[in-house]
Image (cartoon, rainbow, N blue to C red):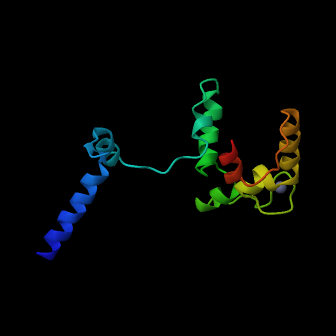
Amino acid sequence: MMQAQSLQNSLSDKLTAMTIQGKFSIKKVYLCLIPQYQKVAGRSISLQPNMHPRYKFILWLVAWRRLAIVDRLLEFNIHVPMECCFCDTVDETLDHRFFACPATNDLWCRLLHWLGLHETIGTWQEELQWA
Ligand SMILES: [Zn+2]
């Protein structure tokens, strides 16, 4: 009996949430029914119509951390030298390769300067959010 009452209250709350100013809204029902997924950072970049499909694919790989660099290759038991191929000082990770490595960081700084942007370079996730 108690369970039926709480179910009725839950249903009543849901129906109340589907109304706007006392009127039933089919839009709110639709929005309740479709699944809500986490927004993918960088999606607006990868949907650019003028971008070459090769670059879209690489961006997609990087955004989902699927690009085959050293730390990812180790997950597949593929052993390659761990050091960064640009600076040979630290282990290569996605964040190091693209932003923390002095060589690529300098490249990003020059590119941003050329574009007239004066941003500080952060981690991959921060840069994807910024873009
Ligand atoms: Zn490096």
Q: Which of 127 and 15 lies nearest the eye of the viewer? A: 15
Q: Which of 62 and 22 lies nearest the eye of the viewer? A: 22
- Where is residue 117, by image quadrant? top right
> Would you say 91 lies left or right of 79 here?
right
> Would you say 64 lies left or right of 81 here?
left
- Where is residue 8, by image quadrant? bottom left
Q: Name the residue at 87% across, 33% down.
A: 114
Q: Name the residue at 71% across, 48% down.
A: 127
- Residue 35 percent across, percent down from the top left: 36, 48
- Residue 18 percent across, percent down from the top left: 29, 48
Q: Which of 76 and 105 lies nearest the eye of the viewer? A: 105
- Residue 10 percent across, percent down from the top left: 24, 63
Q: Name the residue at 35% across, 44% down.
A: 31
> Would you say 111 lies left or right of 62 here?
right
Q: Name the residue at 61% across, 42% down.
A: 42
Task: Give the quarter of the figure containing the N terminus.
Answer: bottom left
For ligand 1, the image quadrant comes to bottom right
